[in-house]
Image: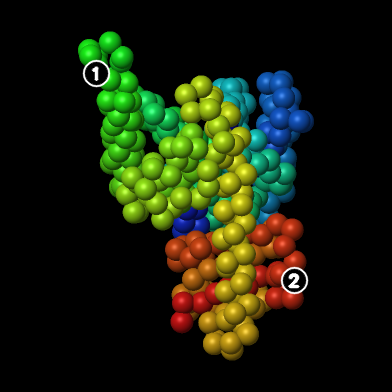
Amino acid sequence: MQANDITRERLRRLAGLRAGDDAKVLSLFVNLDPREFATAAARSTEVRSLLDRAARLIRELAGVSHAAQTSLRADVERIDAELGRGGLDAKGAHGLAVFASSAINLFEVLKLSEPVDHDPVIADAPFIEPLSAIGPPERWCALLVNRRVARLFCGPGAALEEVELIEDELRRRHDQGGWSQANYQRSIDKDAADHVKRSAEVTFARLKDALPAGILVGAPQELINDFERELHPYLRERLAGRLDIDVEHSTVDEVNRAAAKHIEQANRAKQDAALARLAEEFGAGSGRAASGLDEVLAALEQQRVETLLVDAGFEAEDAIERALAQSADVHVLRDRPELASHGHIAAILRF
C-alpha cells in the first residue's frame, strides 16, 4: 500500500514557515522508486549521495552568515542520523521529503506516493513545490455489504484500510420450529434487511464527523439498491461508483485495486470541472479569472484566488505557496493542454 503523508493542512503550514534572520531551511527529496531502489543497500546509497550533495551545496553557499552555515551542517548531521545511520523506514513510500532547520526547530519527514528527483534546496522557507505537484490525497471510503457482513474501508486516495466490520447472523432453520418455508424465508429476508439498515447506520455514525470525498459500494446485485437507499443523504450524495468484488474475502490490496480506477476518474472529473469553469469565466469576461503568472500573483496578493491551476513542471513555487496559505484549491495538471494558452498557470477568482 502506497504511503502519502501530504495533507492540505501540512502543505499550508509548511508554506507559511519562514526561517528568519541568520537561518535557512534545507529541503531534501529522496527518490525511493522501487524499480531503482528495491533493496535497503540501494536506498542507503541514494540517501548517502543526497547528503553528500547537500553538504557540498552548503560549502559552496555564498552570502549567508556563519550561524546559518552551522545550523545547516547540523541539519545534515541529523538527517544522516535519522535516515542514514539510523535506518530508513521506507515502507509504502516511493519517495521522501525532508525539511530541516534547527534554527526554527523544524525537522519533518514525509512519505510520498510518487518518486521525486530533485536537487537539495536551501532557502528561506521549505521548498514544497514537488509536494504540491503530487498533491494531498482526499479521503475515500469503500463499503462492502452482503446479507450478513459489512466491511468499511477508508483512507487517503487508493490507500484504504479496513476500519469497521459489522456482522449479523441470519436466523437458522432449526430456530423456526414448525414454521412454513414461506414464513422462514420472510424471517431470513427481514434479518438481511435489518442488517443492511444497521450497516448503513453504523457507517454514518463512523463517518459523519469527517465525511469522505467519495464513497464506493460493493454488494450483491439484489442488495445494492436497497443498501444505497438506506444510506444517510449526506453519504448518498457522495456515492461515486460500484465495486464488483467479493464482499467477505477480498483483501485490502484487492479493494484498493478495485477502488483506484474510480478515484482516478473522480479526480479527473474535478479537473475537468475546474477547467470548464475557467473557460466559462474567461468567455463571459466576468473578471473572475486570471491568466499567466503575473496576473495570478497579483490576484494572490489581493487574496482573490479560489482555485489555482498549474501545469506540472511549471516553476510556480511562490504562487502555489501563497494559494495554499490562503486555503485555495490547487490543481497540478499532468498531460492536459488546456493551460498552455494561459502560460501554464491560471486561476479562478473569488471576486
Residue 39, image quadrant: top right
For the residues labelled 2 and 1, the Cα–Cα distance comes to 72 Å
Q: Say the numbered circle drawn on residue 179.
A: 1
Query: Residue at coordinates 58% horizontally, 46% vertically from top-left?
Result: 262
Is residue 18 visible to the viewer in this orientation of the structure?
Answer: no
Is 219 placed left or right of 95 in the picture? left
Is 237 placed left or right of 41 in the picture? left
Q: Nearer the viewer, residue 172 or 344?
A: 172
Q: Nearer the viewer, residue 293 or 124?
A: 293
Q: Residues within 10 Å of mark 2 (few under 14, many from 20)?
A: few
The mark that comes first in sequence, 2 or 1, is 1
Whether label 2 touches label 1, CB < 8 Å: no
Q: Residues within 10 Å of mark 1 (few under 14, many from 20)?
A: few
Of badges 2 and 1, the one in the foreground is 1
Query: Residue at coordinates 23% horizontally, 14% vertically from top-left?
Result: 178
Which amino acid, by three-letter code, is at mark 2?
Answer: Ala
Residue 221, horizontal then vertical, whole percent: 50, 37
Which amino acid, by three-letter code, is at mark 1?
Answer: Trp
Element type at mark 2: helix
